[in-house]
Amino acid sequence: MDCVKNEKSAVQGAARGRPGYSREDVIRAAVRAFTARGYDATSMDNVASELGISKSALYHHISSKEEILELTVVQALSRLEGVAEEMAAADVSAGERVRGLLRGSIEVLCSDPKSVALLLRLRGNSEVERSALERRRTLTRSVVPLVEEAQEEGAIRSDIEAPLLTRMIFGMINSTSDWYEPEGRLDAEELASAFESVVFGGLAPQATG
Amino acid sequence: MDCVKNEKSAVQGAARGRPGYSREDVIRAAVRAFTARGYDATSMDNVASELGISKSALYHHISSKEEILELTVVQALSRLEGVAEEMAAADVSAGERVRGLLRGSIEVLCSDPKSVALLLRLRGNSEVERSALERRRTLTRSVVPLVEEAQEEGAIRSDIEAPLLTRMIFGMINSTSDWYEPEGRLDAEELASAFESVVFGGLAPQATG
């Protein structure tokens, strides 16, 4: 097992030439540490301890906490933006596009909940954080016209204004990143269906199935 | 204006004998700083700068960051627990108790969103934080049997299990603490009604107004 791990790491970590852990392993361990303690409270020392390696060994893989943040949070953000762009271009009704956005966002979130949780907790204490926060705001704002279009179409209730509905939908979806376990009992597909059903139908007993 | 402020502060801050800012002012400024930078990234120096006072003047009001956390987060938590206890004892159907819990939680949140946001971001890095997190978990768990009862009663859909429904409801409610402004356009009562309506009825166009 150790042999296989080292072989895999030797390929992935080749550029930095460290055996034992790949760059990917290091990033995953760092994100685990950030999730457990919070990003600001985690030092590179904590990340090194999490892996049982020295700080200098850690710096062979990664140059700073910020680099890890950029690699994980920005990647999650890009995938969420990808879902929004795909839906904006889809040739279906606005109501269907809202459903697609909801399902697609949950799928991104379920594949990497810890990075999304990190994104949602950023406070803007550095340039990387501020830029990610700004992209997150732009993304949320871009959904409002889609919700409005679905309201005009009659697919979504129009007694509550679109910005508030958008916040409610995203609030519910995003909170999943606090508890979802990719290895758990519930897969992304099942969770996306449950959300779609509750977001559209509410808690009221459903007429059909 | 300054005169009035000092007069008010002189009363509230009497116990610690510092003019200019009351203990309440200091706590509010600290919570603002925690919200802006994150709790772990905020030092007592930052809080002192926020108020334009020296660090030693700050320590006349408050002994530590943890004391502030305890005063704000634990207070918000106690009020949320109060809502849950009141609903557990209420002599109405389980469905009505879920609605009451939802509305009551939003009211607590709207009256002090920053303290609730702080509570939701705690990672358990100290005894105060771990104890608050444990109380938060106990509170969330205590709602599941109520949701189950409402499902048995037929007031809430039963095609999705109660723990997941509970997480969805609280996820949506809690996220309000990220953006709600008590001085803003939307009052707590209106927001609670919008949430109740969307949580129970969903996004689908509503049969009646």
Image (cartoon, coloured by chain):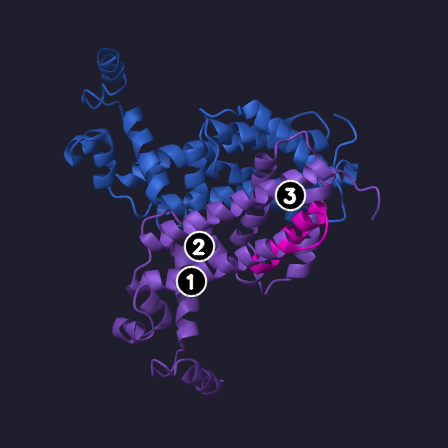
Chain colours: A blue, B purple
Q: Nearer the viewer, residue B173 or A26?
A: B173
In x, y percent, where is residue A193? 63, 27
User: For numbered disc 3, what is the local secondary structure?
Assistant: helix
What residue is shown with label 1?
B31
What residue is shown with label 3?
A144
- Given the image, on which type of amino acid does mark 3 rest? Val
Q: Is residue A1 above or below residue B156?
A: above
Alpha carbon separation for disc pair 2 and 1? 8 Å
The residue lying at 49 percent from left, 55 percent from top is B116
Label 1 packing within 10 angstroms: few (<14), some (14-19), many (20+) = many
Instruction: Provide the chain ID for the residue under circle 1.
Output: B
User: For numbered disc 2, what is the local secondary structure?
Assistant: helix
Q: Nearer the viewer, residue B158 or B12?
A: B158
Q: Quadrant of the N terminus of chain A?
A: top left
> Of label 2 and label 1, which has the lower sequence position?
1
Left or right: B31 in relation to A64:
right
Label drawn at residue A186: none
Q: Quadrant of residue A188?
A: top right
Q: Would you say the magenta stretch is mainly helix, strand or loop?
A: helix
Alpha carbon separation for disc pair 1 and 3? 30 Å
What residue is shown with label 2?
B118
Alpha carbon separation for disc pair 2 and 3? 27 Å
Same chain for mark 2 and mark 1? The answer is yes
Question: Is label 1 or label 3 in front?
Answer: 1
Instruction: Provide the chain ID for the residue under circle 2.
Output: B
In x, y percent, where is residue A92? 71, 26
The residue lying at 59 percent from left, 28 percent from top is A192
Q: Is residue B29 above or below residue A41?
A: below
Q: Nearer the viewer, residue A74 or B173?
A: B173
